Image: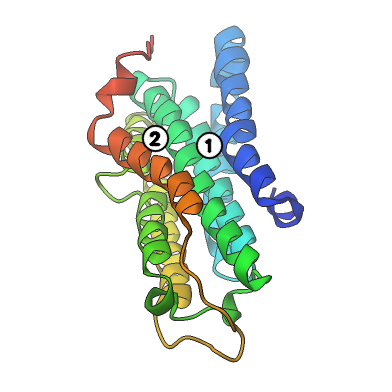
């Protein structure tokens, strides 16, 4: 998936993160757990092991990436690991949290890919080292990027927080050690999210690498603003989605 995101255009990355990844989670929920419940229960320890390794490995690997798209793509790998853990926890909290996390991740990750696309359209590079101090020249873009980053690391009040909290709760009911390892992966996720935000937004602008600076246009802002609204709407009022989800 990181390679696919790296080669895809911005619209392709948004569709891949917002829709195609969720089809995999829907397939697991509808077919694997719904039709083959005994087999799912039998292979739950294996799925837990693979998912936890995916969450921790993706978080550690993200800290070594230099491509903006690959950083966000590896964070998506970590979030999908949490989704599978919640689905195979076989309780209402974990499954509900997985569904909410899939919805929240589709909003936040798509917003981050749109932000990266805006940067690439202006400067024709996705290498992290060329970016610095964007908050001085692109304040509106920086505000949107900060809010999406806070949503990506699961800050309370954002859509990802509700899903991650319920996933950890459902996993803790089934296996407390797995929940502890998932929590450590989330801490690493906060580390690379804050590192990326600090790296490209704060500091002194690198005028030798970036020549022209232009904040988001009206069309770009109208594209980003609905994602911001949905992210906080699901964070503060998750019952608007929960009331339509029937678990068990």
Q: Quadrant of residue 80?
A: top right
Return the x and y of residue 95 as percentages of the image width and height: 42, 23
Q: Residue at x 60, y 43 (%)?
A: 14
Answer with mark 2 or mark 1, whichever residue precedes in sequence. Answer: 1
The count of marks equals 2
Return the x and y of residue 18 as percentages of the image width and height: 56, 37
Q: Nearer the viewer, residue 141 or 242?
A: 141
Q: Nearer the viewer, residue 119 or 156?
A: 119
The answer to whether residue 215 is above or below residue 13 is below
Q: Quadrant of residue 247?
A: top left
The answer to whether residue 20 is above or below residue 196 is above
The answer to whether residue 227 is above or below residue 144 is above
Residue 232 visible within the image:
yes
Residue 56 visible within the image:
no
Question: Mark 2, residues whose alpha carbon is within 10 Å: few (<14), some, or many (≥20)?
Answer: some
Q: Which residue is the site of mark 1?
A: 48
Return the x and y of residue 241 as percentages of the image width and height: 34, 22
Q: Which residue is the site of mark 2?
A: 175
């Amino acid at each position: 998936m990181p390679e696919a995101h790296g080669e895809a255009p911005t619209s392709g990355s948004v569709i891949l993160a917002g829709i195609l990844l969720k089809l995999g989670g829907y397939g697991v929920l509808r077919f694997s757990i719904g039709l083959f419940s005994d087999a799912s229960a039998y292979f739950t320890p294996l799925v837990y092991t693979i998912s936890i390794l995916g969450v921790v490995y993706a978080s550690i690997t993200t800290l070594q990436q230099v491509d903006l798209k690959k950083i966000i793509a590896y964070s998506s790998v970590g979030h999908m690991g949490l989704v599978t853990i919640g689905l195979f926890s076989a309780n209402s909290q974990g499954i509900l949290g997985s569904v909410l996390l899939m919805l929240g991740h589709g909003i936040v990750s798509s917003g981050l890919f749109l932000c990266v696309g805006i940067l690439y359209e202006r400067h024709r590079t996705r290498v992290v080292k060329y970016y610095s101090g964007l908050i001085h020249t692109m304040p509106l873009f920086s505000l949107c990027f900060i809010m999406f980053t806070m949503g990506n690391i699961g800050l309370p009040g954002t859509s990802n927080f509700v899903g991650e909290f319920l996933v950890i709760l459902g996993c803790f009911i089934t296996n407390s050690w797995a929940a502890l390892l998932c929590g450590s992966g989330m801490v690493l996720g906060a580390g690379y999210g804050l590192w990326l935000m600090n790296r490209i937004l704060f500091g002194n602008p690198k005028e030798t690498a970036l020549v022209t600076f232009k904040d988001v246009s009206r069309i770009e802002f109208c594209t980003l603003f609905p994602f911001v609204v949905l992210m906080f709407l699901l964070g503060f009022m998750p019952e608007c989605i929960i009331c339509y989800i029937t678990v068990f």
